[in-house]
Image (tube, coloured by chain):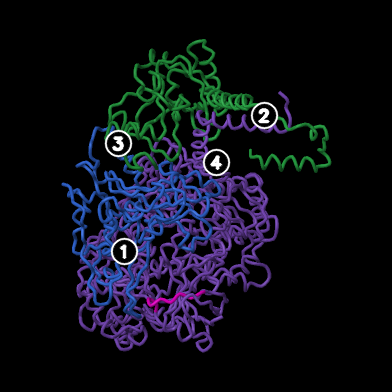
Amino acid sequence: MSTDQNQTVSTEAATDPVNHEPETNDSPPSKSSGWAVFLFFMIGFVGSILSGWILFPELLYSKKDQPIDFNHAVHLDVVSDDCESCHYFRDDGSFAGMPDLSSCIDCHEEAQTDDPEEIKFVDEYVTPDIEVPWLNHSKQPDCVFFSHSAHVIGADMSCESCHGDIGTSEHTRVYEENRLTGYSRDIWGYSISRLGKPEAGEPKPMKMNDCAKCHKEETGHKGACFQCHK
Amino acid sequence: MKDKNAKRYGMVIDLDKCTGCGSCMVGCYSENNVPFKADETNKLDSINWIRVYKITNNKTYPNTEVCYLPMPCMQCDGAHEGHSPCVSVCPAVATDYDYDTGIVSQIYTRCFGCRYCMAACPYHARKFNWWDPVWPADMEKYLSPNVSPRMRGVVEKCSFCFHRYQLARDKAYLEKREELEENEYQTACAEACPTGAITFGDLNNKHHAVYKLKNSPRAFRLLERLNTNPKVYYLTSKSWVRKAGDNYLAHEEPTKIKNNIKEHH
Amino acid sequence: MKIDRRSFLTYTTALVLGGAAGSMLTPAPWKLTDDVSIWTQNWPWTPVPEDGEVTYKQSVCTLCPGGCGINVRLIDGRPVKIKGLEDHPVNKGSLCPMGISGLQYLYGPSRVTSPLKREGKRGEGKWKKVSWEEALGAVTKKLAELRASGRPQSVACITGSDQGTTPNLIGRFLTAYGSPNYIRSATAQDAIEQAIYLTQGKQGTPVFDIENADFVLSFGSGILDGWGSAGRMFNLYGSQKPAKKIIQVEPRLSDTAAKANQWLGINPGTEGALALGLAHVIIKESLYDRNFVENFAFGFDDWTDDNGKTHDGFAKMVKNFAPDKVSKITGIDKAEIVSLARAFARASKPIAINGRGHGAIPGSIDESLAVQSLNALVGNINKPGGISAIPDSNYAKWPEVNIDEIASKGMQQPRIDGAGSEQFPNTRFLLNRLPEIINSAKGESPVQALLVTDANPMYTLPDTAATKKAFDRIPFIVSFSPYMDETASHADYILPNHSYLERLQDVPTAAGISRQVISLAKPVVKPTYETKHVGDSFILIAKALGGFIENAFPWEDYEAFLKETLKDQWRKLKKKGIIEIKYDLPEPLAFTFNTVSTKFEFYPTARGSVKQKQNSALPTYTPVPIEGDVQRFKLVLIPYDSIRLAGGAIANAPFMTKTVDDTVLKKQVGLLEINPATAKGLGLKEGATALLTTPKGETTVKVHLYEGIKPGIIAMPRGLGHTAYSEFLADKGINVNTLTGPIEDPGSGLDMAWGIRAKLIRI
């Protein structure tokens, strides 16, 4: 703030009949302590750093639980030991993504255990024939075309290399949704700074730069726009 | 970055066979979620990825002749491959040239609507969304998930149905194939053309029909002398149609196709 | 430390600056910038179509009678795209723009989404949603009342087709109910069928084997503008051998004329004279098929009847049509006529066809007879590459209808439209006569209740004002249309049918193709709205009427009815979507005809009773007296058909209207085509506004100068000027039917108008 402005403010205060306070006006102008200014600066500085790193990510994402607490580990153990038995490719090479009820119904026509989550699944979804509104951590926006077959079959990549070790999880993760963009937090990546590499087993971030980076490393070029956009 | 398997997808449109029915336009609208509005008669704000123009030989009755001229995006190579007029002017990298297919992209979420590309395009292939599209009374239900619906304020154009290329490639990956068959990737307009006037394929692949057709003595391209190197070729047996393909003066003979892009075999 | 105002501000500033500096070292500003830009890319009102599994369903397009096979792409059961069905015998993968726009007939603002009861005045657009019970109940009540008062014949039904189970079911209903007034919309097919019947004695669907012909002489048939099965014609054109010739005879350079090997601009309405002129040259130069004419034809030479009276033969009659004279009538150069006749006769498989544009107007019987005679002259009857007729598919065989006394009395009444009467014995339906008959009736209208399905007469009949007046006199109108078309919007009740992609329907052979196939239109998606199959509506009304009418319908619903109709073929049809019924095309040159003479009759004896007033039943050319005083109306207005505009019962989809050029429609104003020379004489420049007047009405138009139209002629497309539907179609241009009127063919009663006189004044 400049001195000019300070003077203007004082003048206004002096002529303002409502704010007229003779005591203040009579006292000598106080001197701001340099240390105090620095202290306030630091309070602001540290405060915003703390809120930027801790509070901001908390506020930016809303948290939702999956409709059913799905146990991947049990299914890998009991059903099949690969992902593709449920997350399969269709005959035309497209990827089916989240399995629908028809994939589950063979085993879960009726509850097989007394697990409350399974009972809930059967009662609320299987019996009334309603698809489970799973929250997809890896859902890309409409402008993105992503080919699973190019990556999984063409480039022989494992599911884990992008999705982490979700296959061995016993519980679903909390789904965090960006309040502004509506994207899953996984797209940006769990590190709010996007610095460093994801921990082993963590899903990889999936923003355009992440795709481009890997493409550059693997193919020597980031690729043309249409390669991933529609 | 351009590998030896690179394709140059292109189109050959036989004007002798085109009856002007408009099936290509409608096939394109329904394939690519092209919006429509109550009044589409102002063709400057009417969004068409392919538009069939009607041209005449300017002779009086009864010597009048009419030719229909379907115009999609010409997917120009430019003077050197990759130097399409629109790509060179886009300040947002919202349109680029794919060296693997020769197709010029348009990314709606990247475009900020400056319309430089429209000014640069000599073929009026690019259209601007002056309004947000509206699909009334449940019509949203027929939209295809393979092409993103656009929003107000962006430019759009023909993509040679690139999504069909992507989907065909998905299938090829599944079947562990490197190459696509000719019929696996066809544009919606080529598919819709009821007289088979539109042929689509890899101009570099001598097994594809377009390879031979583009060298036909009937072949020509639009505005050949601009050096835009379009990948859309036309066939006609009428000299006046060929002459209408560029701004030739009365004494000038139509220029031969100058293909300065090296072909791969 | 004393906090005064000044230091407070200083410290606050320090705090804010510190905060700002600190935030730069956090992800917040960068992340927010990124997120905000993404947010602007994902407006909630921009739809995000759901992805899913791709499947295909095969069916048949029933938007027009063409019967083209379609392949519908679905994503997660949701139809997203229609393309032609590759292996369908009619269209072999080709489809017209209307067929490709099909999904816009499934959804959209023109759909009637539930039964409606009229609230305000007719056509006012005020409706009340009612239940199916109420709607069916109201129709049943009205029909029961009319029967109770002994007037079942005052119920008429207008349909778009008389082939297949749905029209047959409705016909059966009317019979059981007691009304002979089942009226199908007429097309050029009616005139051609009648000409084939008169010359060959065959009642059936005409076949034009254009596939195998090598010389197609088209008297104005828009074979590339939507005539016949459009998909088939386009496919044929695209795959034809270069040697095949198409000659197009019409006053306007249509798409067909533009693609033809030769275009002959003819004075409109004189096509019959040209056909006879060509016959003249062919006979004079002995270019005709001597074997056919001498052995299998009757009436070519002069002949003597049982009473010893000598009649002129065809050969003698056409002597009146020498090239000089025909040239004057048709406006075609004499040399052109001679060379066309020679080329036609010398081609190995020439075929002559007629029916202007899409074939919406039947045209004169004389013209169709002249064209058939031309085909006979070159012996191209019942041969590959020629003309024949296949018997109407007769798979619809049900137990005889037992009718009660009221119905019996009603069925003995003459048809209101006069078809089949002594005056028009060979004509089956005469919808074009209905408005005039109702309007001129003294006392109450002969039609007391009108049921309309698969037709939109309020739009398609010429002389819209007269039609509206007639319909206003009908006390009770029920529409079964899935769309809010002109007729539906003037109805008292709308009982909406499913849209074509939601309903089951058998589709018999379309006119033209030389194979008798039955296709099955299968629902590709469950009904979206509260609609009901029109067959089910009729069955429910029959059941509610009770008695003999109920007994005539022992079937639970339309599907059961269809199943029983097709019997053992049902399973095959359901599985394959198409069955072919073998019929015996006579062996080449084994010509057998069902006529009196058992020969092809150049002199159609069956026409004798009709032509009593004239001396001869031979086809002749008499100018069609089109309406309007020549002095007052110096120009001639002709309607034309375009493949991008649907002029029939089903109107344009928004996608089709989008393809229409700005030389045809500009904003809401239709453009009138006029030759620049004619325009100059009237002081009209491109785009000028003018007042167009005909004896039937007047309207404001803009003019489009087009060298491809004969001077003195002005042309306007069919398919614009709708008053109903939605903003995507309504009030765009002019419905040409508001400016034209029907002209009754004295021989058949069918409409033979091809235009009307007109006046154009610059305003």
Answer whether residue B218 is magenta in the image: no
Q: Does residue A51 lie above or below C731 as drawn?
A: above
The quarter of the image holding the C terminus of chain C is bottom right
Residue indicated by mark 1: C208
Residue indicated by mark 3: B171
For the residues labelled 3 and 1, the Cα–Cα distance comes to 43 Å
Magenta segment, which residues? C702-709
For the residues labelled 2 and 3, the Cα–Cα distance comes to 73 Å
Tell me which residue sits at (41%, 57%) in the image. B118
Hue of chain C? purple
**Hey, what amino acid is under mark 2?**
Ser
Tell me which residue sits at (46%, 38%) in the image. C50
- Indicate the chain coloured green by its letter: A
Q: Position of residue B39 (x, y in %)?
A: 52, 60
Q: Nearer the viewer, mark 4 or mark 2?
A: 2
Q: Quadrant of residue C602?
A: bottom left
Q: Nearer the viewer, mark 2 or mark 3?
A: 2
Q: Position of residue C721 (x, y in %)?
A: 54, 66
Q: Chain of mark 4?
A: C
Question: For numbered disc 3, what is the local secondary structure?
Answer: helix
Q: Is residue C127 left or right of residue A183?
A: right
Same subunit, tags 4 and 3? no
Residue indicated by mark 4: C44
Q: Chain of mark 2?
A: A
For the residues labelled 4 and 2, the Cα–Cα distance comes to 51 Å
For the residues labelled 4 and 3, the Cα–Cα distance comes to 32 Å
Q: Nearer the viewer, mark 2 or mark 1?
A: 2
Q: Position of residue C445 (x, y in %)?
A: 64, 67
Same subunit, tags 2 and 1? no
